[in-house]
């Protein structure tokens, strides 16, 4: 076995990493999906800790988005998939300016406002998913217009997990570019 991987020295006796997310004895799929979603939401917040307001707002090159812009984007993702998608609520699913507005935090919007909006979407999503079964289909009329288009809650949650995993990984890269901090 090589002692170096991508230029980094490996410890002589590497200890396997413990599992992140729900407890190791959790085997219920509903509890696992919601538990991992909660873990990734908290990971997002952990990875922002210690950044100044300027660091939160400044787009990271060459990525082109700011950490706070990523939080704002994930607010819209939560809304689109759970409130507009699963529950078919009559909510605005996209900002009027499209992707550029979704990822760009207005100068007159505080970091606290962005974080509060994100938390409000998470709270709304949690209330929708707590009592629903994984095989419950999305309601029609919001994001999904026909029964053939409507995915199950399990499918939506799985999609959200991959979205969070990808973006929390992106935030690791951004954070390393900002101040050299690396993720877990």
Image: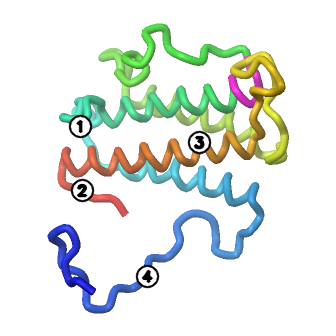
Q: Give the quadrant of residue 83.
A: top right
Residue at 64% across, 57% down: 35
Range covered by the magenta-colored residues: 84-89
Residue 90 visible somewhere in the drawing: yes
**Quadrant, the N terminus:** bottom left
Q: Which residue is mark 2?
A: 181
Q: Which residue is mark 3?
A: 160
Dot 3 and dot 4 residues touching (CB under 8 Å): no
Q: Position of residue 20 (x, y in %)?
A: 52, 67
Q: Which residue is mark 1?
A: 55
Q: Callout 1 environment at 10 Å: few (<14), some (14 to 19), or many (20+)?
A: some
Residue at 34% across, 15% down: 108
In the image shown, does 57 or 164 lie closer to the viewer?
164
In the image shown, does 53 or 159 lie closer to the viewer?
159
> In the drawing, what numbered circle is on residue 116?
none
Q: Which residue is mark 4?
A: 16
Kind of element beneath mark 1? helix
Residue at 60% across, 42% down: 159
* Mark 3 → mark 2, Cα distance in angstroms: 25 Å
Q: Nearer the viewer, mark 3 or mark 1?
A: 3
Residue 48 visible somewhere in the drawing: no
In terms of sequence position, does the residue under pointer 1 or pointer 2 come before the other?
Answer: 1
Q: Position of residue 154 (x, y in %)?
A: 73, 46
Q: Is residue 168 above or below residue 156?
A: below
How many numbered marks have been drawn onto this rendered protein structure?
A: 4
In terms of sequence position, does the residue under pointer 3 or pointer 4 come before the other?
Answer: 4
* Residue 64 appears left or right of 28: left
Kind of element beneath mark 3? helix
């Amino acid at each position: 076995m090589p002692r170096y991987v991508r230029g980094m020295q490996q410890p002589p006796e590497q200890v396997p990493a413990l599992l992140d997310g729900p407890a190791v004895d959790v085997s219920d799929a509903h509890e696992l999906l919601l538990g991992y979603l909660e873990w990734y939401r908290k990971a997002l917040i952990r990875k922002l800790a210690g950044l100044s307001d300027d660091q939160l707002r400044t787009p990271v090159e060459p990525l082109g988005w700011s950490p706070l812009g990523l939080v704002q984007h994930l607010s819209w993702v939560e809304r689109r998939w759970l409130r507009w998608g699963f529950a078919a609520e009559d909510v605005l699913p996209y900002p009027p300016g499209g992707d550029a507005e979704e990822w760009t935090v207005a100068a007159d919007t505080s970091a606290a406002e962005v974080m509060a909006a994100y938390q409000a979407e998470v709270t709304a999503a949690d209330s929708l998913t707590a009592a629903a079964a994984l095989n419950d289909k999305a309601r029609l009329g919001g994001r999904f217009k026909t029964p053939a288009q409507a995915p199950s809650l399990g499918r939506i949650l799985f999609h959200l997990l991959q979205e969070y995993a990808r973006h929390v990984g992106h935030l690791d890269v951004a954070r390393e570019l900002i101040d050299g901090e690396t993720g877990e």
